[in-house]
Amino acid sequence: MQIFHDEHLSIDWSAVRFDNVKLTLTRKEFELLAMLSQNEGETIPRAVLLETIWGYCSGTRTRTLDVHVRRLRRKLGQYGEEYIQTIFGVGYRFARLRAPRPLVMPSPATYAIGA
Amino acid sequence: MQIFHDEHLSIDWSAVRFDNVKLTLTRKEFELLAMLSQNEGETIPRAVLLETIWGYCSGTRTRTLDVHVRRLRRKLGQYGEEYIQTIFGVGYRFARLRAPRPLVMPSPATYAIGA
DNA sequence: GTTCGTTTTTACAAGATTTTTACAACCTGG
DNA sequence: CCAGGTTGTAAAAATCTTGTAAAAACGAAC
């Protein structure tokens, strides 16, 4: 059963792969990634993540979520910050990689490079 | 009847061979290897292994499974840990050896190694 | 720019889990 | 019964996961 898939990242209940390389996530890391990616594009408030995954009631003072986001981002490598975005003061959001648009040269070449 | 086969390992009900050398496994070792390899790629929880192979009911405190995994890994030699993987906090998983992908040199060789 | 609150980053420690070693009990065939 | 291999357990060592603390970096508002 698949949770999320795109060109680079594949998230299943059985495994997570980035460019076909399997990532070994811990239980909490996986829960976090699953919850975020299941709500692709939506910002999930910190309090919701902390309550759903950790069972912390709102108001608990902790940096646990942030550290887990960091560990997850690091395992996602180069695109960690693009997949898991910080919404300042609110929470985090999972976003599909922005497909790099091909470079199209205008013609005639009336633009300048470097100067 | 064959249970599992790949480039190095061959598991049949009658014999287990690694690189064409026959391994002598004990009954429990064989049951363990068979059950794991029959579910290649799937993580089998400790409780399931302990119940299926040993008949232990869930909750039994024992290290028996771990020790048998160790003995099995040792007999599988160099690749023991690659064939039988530990899924921390869950159980064990049998995995086919990761085929080393051939090194393809880009052309022309415009990249740098070491500097 | 300053200030205050938030997030990131690093390092550490506690607790849980797994690995490793050694040993004793148990079969089982002869 | 004996010898040899098999199986389970105990305990120490190693490893992994997780949460927290504290400093640094960052963001928004003034």
Image: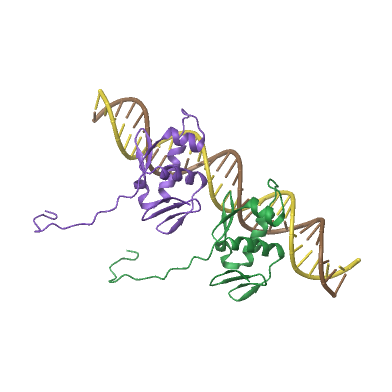
Chain colours: A purple, B green, C brown, D yellow
Q: Residue furthest bottom?
A: B20
**Residue under the image location 61 percent in, 60 percent down:** B36
The residue closer to the viewer here, A32 or A68, is: A32
- Percent x, y of residue A67: 44, 41
- Percent x, y of residue A91: 38, 36
The quadrant where residue D4 appears: bottom right
**Residue under the image location 47 percent in, 35 percent down:** A50
The residue closer to the viewer here, A93 or B79, is: A93
| Total marks in image | 0
- Percent x, y of residue A52: 49, 36
**Residue under the image location 55 percent in, 57 percent down:** B42
The residue closer to the viewer here, B21 or A40, is: A40
The quadrant where residue A20 appears: bottom left
**Residue under the image location 34 percent in, 71 percent down:** B105
Asked if residue B69 is positioned above or below residue A50 in the image, the reply reads: below
Q: In the drawing, does residue A91 fall left or right of residue A53? A: left
The quadrant where residue C15 appears: top right
Q: In the drawing, does residue B57 fall left or right of residue A91? A: right
- Percent x, y of residue D27: 30, 35
Q: In the drawing, does residue C6 fall left or right of residue D5? A: left
